[in-house]
Image (cartoon, rainbow, N blue to C red):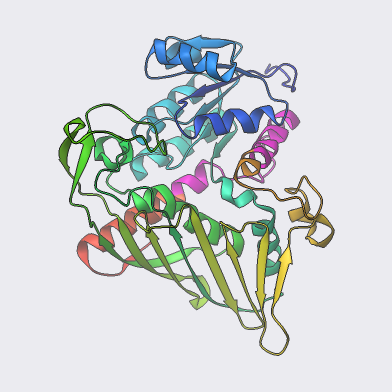
């Protein structure tokens, strides 16, 4: 008989503590969830990060963390190539799993994880945290209630500048670590997931155009953490050929004849982390900008346009659940982790595995893998690719 888990008894292990791992730790702690231990690439790195983050246990290896009977849930914030083997091992070790995206390196791997999660009956989640912004949730309510009418166009972009220079480097640039898709897999997947979440529509076919502007980059001879911006000397670099995309524009045919287009790039100077979408319907339009996350633009033809500010008193019932503070008190990126993990752990504590989850699962992660593989194939073959 499985033990009843509560906030006071549950134990969480986190694998990977680079840029995103500490965001997991903070989001968990803000929900009163005990982060019991962590694993890193080496035992020394684990010890150092455990001290830095105030986590009681540092494991010599990921396998040792899985072997700890007091660990009930595993959070995976490791490089992409480790997501599938780590998630698979965690499920087989009878642990619930929260995994960063992409869920795996290939659709065959992600499909296996969906099947294994169903077989083991363990809670499984993919960290599509951007769903949890209150104004995104409110946009979803407006779209799915029919308030903006029949959908015509889904358009937008996800733009960053942290790989603008040829001297910018990160493990995601290496295909053996991050996969053959980079900008689309890393950030484009968030936009694609968001549009399906907000509209409820699936993609039928895609046509993609890729460009790698820096075909040669300068790789540091010493490892750097994501977004650290450390300066190195010219002698600290080696030339490295790059095959993954700096830029992608993707045409999208959705269900019901809805059309879409998105541009994804990591070389757009001044755009730090801008996920933008606009949805045009037969009655009105709406738009959301991730760099101004507490605002939702409503566009009208016969009446004045509106800017709706984040205020629980003005939000739909669903959106209110992801807003912790009153109007005028902004909520941002760290809050999305808190809100996502609240949903995941409330589900775990309730113990009803037959209830439909209200958070992104491995099935959602697999769907994005299917879409992304079709996008990559389209870019290579120069033609429309149907989503199987």
Which region is colored magenta? 338-366
Place of residue 302 in the rendered image (x, y in percent of width and height, measured from the top left): 71, 90
In the picture, measured across the screen, residue 367 lies left or right of residue 237, that is right
Residue 121 visible at all: no
Residue found at x 60% / y 64%: 288
Q: Is residue 386 above or below residue 147?
A: above
State the residue at coordinates (48%, 23%).
Answer: 90
Q: Nearer the viewer, residue 24 or 96?
A: 24
Q: Is residue 363 magenta?
A: yes
Q: Quadrant of residue 285?
A: bottom right
* As drawn, 270 above or below 170: below
Say whether residue 354 is left or right of residue 228: right
Magenta-colored segment: predominant secondary structure: helix
Of 348 and 284, the residue lying toward us: 284
- Quarter of the image that includes the C terminus: bottom left
Q: Is residue 325 visible?
A: yes
Estimate the x, y position of residue 385 in percent, counting from the top left: 31, 65
Residue at the bottom extreme? 302
Q: Is residue 270 above or below residue 142?
A: above
- Residue found at x 63% / y 44%: 336
In the image, residue 274 lies at what x, y percent?
Answer: 49, 57
Image quarter for residue 113? Answer: top left
């Amino acid at each position: 008989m499985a033990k009843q888990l509560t906030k006071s008894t549950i134990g969480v292990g986190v694998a990977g503590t680079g840029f995103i791992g500490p965001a997991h730790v903070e989001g968990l702690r803000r929900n009163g969830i005990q982060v019991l231990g962590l694993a890193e690439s080496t035992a020394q790195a684990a010890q150092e990060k455990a001290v830095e983050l105030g986590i009681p246990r540092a494991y010599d290896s990921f396998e040792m963390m899985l072997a700890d009977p007091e660990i009930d849930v595993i959070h995976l914030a490791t490089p992409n190539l480790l997501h599938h083997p780590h998630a698979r091992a965690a499920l087989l070790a009878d642990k619930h799993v929260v995994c960063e995206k992409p869920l795996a390196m290939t659709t065959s791997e992600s499909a296996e994880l969906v099947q294994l999660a169903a077989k083991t009956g363990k809670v499984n989640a993919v960290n599509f945290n951007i769903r949890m912004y209150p104004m995104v949730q409110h946009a979803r309510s407006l779209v799915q209630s029919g308030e903006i009418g029949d959908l015509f166009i889904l358009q937008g972009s996800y733009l960053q500048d942290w790989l603008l220079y040829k001297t910018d480097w990160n493990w995601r640039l290496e295909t053996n670590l991050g996969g053959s898709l980079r900008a689309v897999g890393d950030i484009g997947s968030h936009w694609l997931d968001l549009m399906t979440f907000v509209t409820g529509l699936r993609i039928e076919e895609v046509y993609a155009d890729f460009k790698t502007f820096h075909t040669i980059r300068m790789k540091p001879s010493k490892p750097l953490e994501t977004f650290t911006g450390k300066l190195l000397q010219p002698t600290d670099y080696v030339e490295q050929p790059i095959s993954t995309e700096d830029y992608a524009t993707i045409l999208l045919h959705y269900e019901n004849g809805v059309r879409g287009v998105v541009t994804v790039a990591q070389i757009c100077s001044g755009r730090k982390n801008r996920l933008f979408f606009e949805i045009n319907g037969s009655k009105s339009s709406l738009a959301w900008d991730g760099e101004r996350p507490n605002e939702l633009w409503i566009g009208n033809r016969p009446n004045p346009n509106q800017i709706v500010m984040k205020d629980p008193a003005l939000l739909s019932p669903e959106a209110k659940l992801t807003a912790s503070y009153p109007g005028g008190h902004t909520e941002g990126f760290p809050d999305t982790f808190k809100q996502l993990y609240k949903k995941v752990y409330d589900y775990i504590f309730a113990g009803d595995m037959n209830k439909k989850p209200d958070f992104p699962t491995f099935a959602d992660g697999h769907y994005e893998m299917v879409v992304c593989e079709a996008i990559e194939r389209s870019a290579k073959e120069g033609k429309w690719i149907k989503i199987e």
